[in-house]
Image: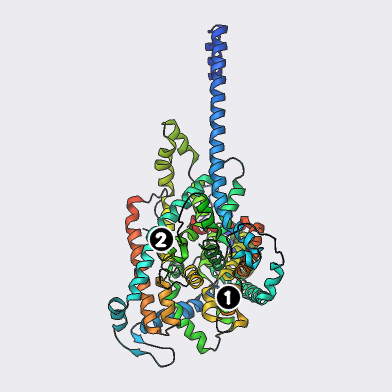
Amino acid sequence: MGSLSEWITFQMSTFTAEQREYMRLQSLQAKRKKRWHDFLLMVANHSVLIALSAIFILPLFLVLVISVMGHGQAETRSLWPHPFIWHNYVEVFTAVPFLRWTMNSLFVSLMTTIGTVVSSVPPAYVLSRLRWKGRGVTFIIILSTMMLPGQVTMIPVYIIFSKLHWIPSFLPLIVPSFFSSAFSIFLLRQFFASIPDEISDAARIDGCSEFKLMMQIIVPLAKPAISAIGLFAFLGSWNDFFGPLLYLVENEKLWTLGIGLNAFQGIHHVQKNMMMTASVLFMLPVIIIFFFSQKVFIEGVTLTGVKG
Amino acid sequence: MSIASAMSILPSRKRGKGLVAPPRKKLKTPKIFIFLCLSPWLIGILMFTLYPMVTSFYQSFTKFNLIDAPKWVGLANFHRMFFEDPDFWKALRNTVWISAISIPLRIAFAIFSAWMLTKPKRGKNVYRTIFFLPSMVPAVAATMVFTYIFNPAYGPINRFLEMLGIKEPPFWFLDPKWSKWGLILLGLWGIGDTMIIFLAGLLDVPRTLYEAASLEGASAWQSFRYVTFPMITPVIFFSGVTGVIGSFQYFTQAYVASGQVNDYSHSMYFYATHIYFSAFRAYEMGYASALAWVLLVITLVCTLIILRTQKRWVHYPNGSLFK
């Protein structure tokens, strides 16, 4: 049976040479037109994308520029540093207790990360890899606590911590993270559920205990999801403002970067552009982390939103 | 036990049906293991969610200043809220106003940026990184930066606007009429995480649908309106719900910005700010608890309304998640 291309060749052979030449030119022209059209489309797309990129970058660029201006110049309307005062980045450590804030932030964020990961893996494991009565209900409860506004529980929790004499201290920020976060359980559960059941069955048949199965087989397989919740916990704590505002504000020595940056200036009258220098240093770790872990991060965000 | 279960998944010939595996036998997991694994969450939810919820519900009917024992006052807190507290109405109005504008704007802008990201053949990752980056910036730093660069006296933004020929650019955070627009712009700048969710949704749309549309002669707009849009309605629905929940808890940016510019007219005074000031500046814990419960009810009602309307506009290819 003749294929389509053979049939076309047969049809073509009935045309004269001139006709064939004419058709060839026609198709060539169409191709060129299409290529030109595609090129224009590409230029248009990239121009829009570059314009958007410029908008997203602009504030970061401006703060970098302002952060190296002299004090006098920052109060004027000039746009470009003259001269560049790189010394601002040294001065900021003496103008504000920047190092202390950074260490405080780092300590709280690291402890919170450890707490969240350690306490969220086991609940997520039993919610996704084991079948038991009440599992569905438990999962729905976890989902609904995610929707609960923090303001509703805020005051009694504050009173608990104040009765324990934990205010001001880091404990109210760190301790709750050791009792699971609904969001992390949810994210981990989604990932655990995607690991085939056969793996667990095989291990169980070989007499592997459930705890060993969780720690030695499932956890290593779920590394991407675990690093995602670790990252989210770290950044959530690093960027947190409300928690430190409630629990640390009374003791200046305990201030984290967020609270320090906001409150210090009002009390000690530091130059405004020095605060911009401090802001740059505050963002820097987050941005560095992002560049190194972009993939984990974006997959994590996607996992929370769509596959629900 | 392990041998018996191993036997059971071997193909059984006894039933005479050849290689058919018998129904998988359930392997028993000790209840104590399940309980132990859940215990951090259980203790957490009892200590930090359930007990506080019950307590704050009770406190919302009391007068309570942290030092003396709570005194039962019935519905007085709620009466005060609706009839005697102008700050409550101011905060509620501000919150509703900014939600009504910023939630749809954020969704539209996130869709637009995500949609643009699906277009180019090269450079996708570079653009995506740039678009996502601002959402990583800590809220305090971002707000300080925005109040600085939008400052009419020394900020560069108004300088640029003047160069573009705008004679009298707004005073942004310093002007009560414009301060919320400053916050909205700040929110749009950090659109990254919403955008990534939309991007995933857009990439999930089967290519064949677009091909079918283009064969039918659909224009770019038509293929967006009738193919892309219905396919991403679940994501729009999701970000609408989280947007409403989030906007009633909107605090940090507004608090930092009003601290930076001396917001004497309370133009950036929102619902969550009102709760914070009632509880931790005025130490009226009972009244603040009442405010928090009203917040919960408002959030629930809004969510339910969106849930109710979803049948009409949200398209689920594999059936709905919430029935």
Q: Residue B310: name its quadrant.
A: bottom left
User: Percent position (x, y) of residue B66?
Assistant: 44, 89
User: Percent position (x, y) of residue B222?
Assistant: 40, 38
Asked if marks 1 and 2 fall on the same chain, the answer is: no
The colour style of the image is rainbow
Q: Are marks 1 and 2 in contact (CB under 8 Å)?
A: no
* Residue B35, visible in the rendered structure: no
Secondary structure at numbered mark 1:
helix
User: Percent position (x, y) of residue B117?
Assistant: 54, 46
* Residue B280, visible in the rendered structure: yes
| Residue at figure coordinates x 39%, y 80% from the top left | B288
Q: Residue A235: name its quadrant.
A: bottom right
| Residue at figure coordinates x 47%, y 35% from the top left | B211
Residue identified by numbered label 2: B241
Which chain is indicated by disc 1?
Answer: A
Image quadrant in which the N terminus of chain A is located: top right
Amino acid carrying label 1: it is Gln
Relative to the observer, which residue lies in front, B32 or B277? B277
- What label does residue A265 carry, if any? 1
Secondary structure at numbered mark 2:
helix
Q: Nearer the viewer, mark 1 or mark 2?
A: 1
| Residue at figure coordinates x 62%, y 62% from the top left | A66
Label 1, residues with CA under 10 Å away: few <14, some 14-19, many ≥20: some
Amino acid carrying label 2: it is Val
Relative to the observer, which residue lies in front, B37 or B41? B41
Residue sticking out furthest to the bottom: B68
- What label does residue B95 carry, if any? none
Relative to residue B125, is residue A64 depicted above or below? Answer: below
User: Percent position (x, y) of residue A181?
Assistant: 53, 71
Which chain is indicated by disc 2?
Answer: B
Q: CA distance from mark 1 to mark 2?
A: 37 Å
